[in-house]
Image (tube, rainbow, N blue to C red):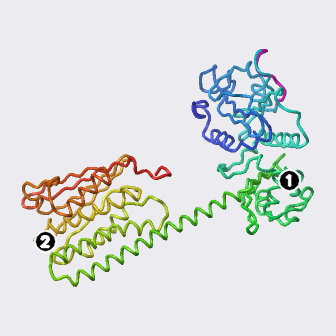
Amino acid sequence: MASLEELAPGLPQSRLNHLQRLMRTWAPLADISFADLLLYVPTGAVGQTPATENPSGYAIAGQIRPTTARSVHRSDLVGAVFAPEQRPLVDVAYREGRITDGGRIGGADQPRIRTLTVPVNCHGEVVAVMAREFDPDIQRNPGELEMSYFKLFRRLAAMIAEGEYPFPVDDIETEESPRVGDGLMLLDASGRVLLISPNAASALHRIGLHSEVEGRRLVEIGLEQRAIRAAFASRLPQTEEIQHGDQGTVVLRCLPLIGRGEVTGALVLMRDISELRRRDRLLMSKDATIAEIHHRVKNNLQTVSSLLRLQGRRATAAEARDAIEESVRRIRAIAIVHEILSRDASSDVPFVEIVRSLVRMVEEGLTGPDRPVEFKVLGDAGELAADVATPLAVVLNECLQNVMDHAYPEPPGGQVRIELDNDGDRVQVRVTDDGVGLPPGFDAGSADGLGIAIVRNLVSTDLRGSITMSNGDGDPPRFGTVVELAIPLLGFRSPDGG
């Protein structure tokens, strides 16, 4: 599908921004007009660019269907180009800069489509045409409410033709933004309610306001008018959430109506979002519970490590004390992951924070003046799912432990580099030291040490990755060691796609 920039390549950026704002905020216009809205931009010869002051064609750059009526166009027309004689009212609106109503599109064997064309004015220049298109044969006879809606559409159309709409702000609608079907009120220039839809009345009832509304200002029935006052004063749209005790929550969106340079009233859209906010509160409670669980797991792991340390102090054999101390460090590595998870209920954790915490743990426990080893953390592995971060933290802890146990048997110490990378498909961790290197004939696949066995099992089974260990390119006797881990991320994605 062609973009607006491709369909109107000669249009200055300020004009493109104006049209993009229109298309981002024209959903209410489609709803209150009960019709499809299409945006036509001028082109040169049909199908060719650039656009000229005397266009010989019009391309459809945007299209939106109403939620309040049946669409007249089943297919997407964006990118279609028409000659002026195929869209005569579009041509009139563009060339003469006036709203034109009435024409018919299509031949005898096609649906009878009526159109109203509105010149889109930007800083005194017509840059496009917005067309309201509908099939009168399939529309029911309009009632009083529908006629009021259409009169409101004509007021907004006049604002477009005068350059007052869209508003000169990035007014992006969200999933919670109210639409016409959610509830609508029309205010006069003094803020009195001229019209209120049944759904808007129901939204007010939800927050405890049951008084008659029409003919009164909202403040008279107990509803603050902060957003409305701000919209009238700034001449810009304003949004506000209104919560009335525990009864409910309503989001109110006020669009000022401007005519001949003066604010003549306002369109107020309302939506009852009580259920959405109730779900938000439940999610927040759930997130807090998950964070508390991680916090308690972290505390329990710290308790276990403290008990092991007490046991280690009573051990008489040096081998037993070393084994207990290694177990303490492994437990603390897992506790670090839960500590970070307890800060945020997200299922993903920034792995570089875990790495830095592991490095601090090693520095505090295994380095000193007699063995000065400097650690450098480079790169970033991004945010990883907890079921990747936990075993990978244990693996990295074993790698750092092995460095401290074997790389520097004699003073002085050295430098260890931990390099992280994440290309979206896999995480790579590279640990490089400048120590004595691997012993002759070392094979990571057959080594029988407990640490290397833990690493092999976690990498191949839990992480489904690979590990290589080799000597570095240093000068003897300090060859150095390079440990490289490659962990695929497929299958470890979090539910939100992270």
Whether residue 102 appears in magenta in the rendering, the answer is yes
Image location of residue 480, percent across then percent down: 14, 59
Question: Bounds of the magenta span?
Answer: 100-108
435, above or below 3, in the image: below
Secondary structure at numbered mark 1: strand
Classify 10 Å Cα crowding around label 2: few (below 14), some (14-19), many (20 and above): few
Which amino acid, mark 1? Leu
Please tell me which residue is depicted at 37% across the width and 60% down the height of the picture. 351
Magenta stretch: dominant secondary structure: strand
Image location of residue 168, percent across then percent down: 69, 48
Quarter location, residue 395: bottom left
Image location of residue 423, percent across then percent down: 36, 47
Task: Tell me, for residue 412, which label it has, or none.
Answer: 2
Q: Nearer the viewer, residue 400 or 161?
A: 400
Task: Tell me, for residue 187, which label it has, or none.
Answer: 1
Secondary structure at numbered mark 2: loop
Taking 83 as reference, is 355 left or right? left
Q: Nearer the viewer, residue 403 or 238?
A: 403
414, above or below 134, in the image: below
Taking 160 as reference, is 312 left or right? left
Measure how far apart labels 1 and 2 are at the Cα level. 81 Å
Q: Earlier in the sequence, mark 1 or mark 2?
A: 1
Which amino acid, mark 2? Pro
Looking at the image, do the residues carrying marks 1 and 2 touch, with CB atoms under 8 Å apart?
A: no
Classify 10 Å Cα crowding around label 1: few (below 14), some (14-19), many (20 and above): many
Q: Does residue 30 appear in the picture of this structure?
A: yes
70, above or below 155, in the image: above
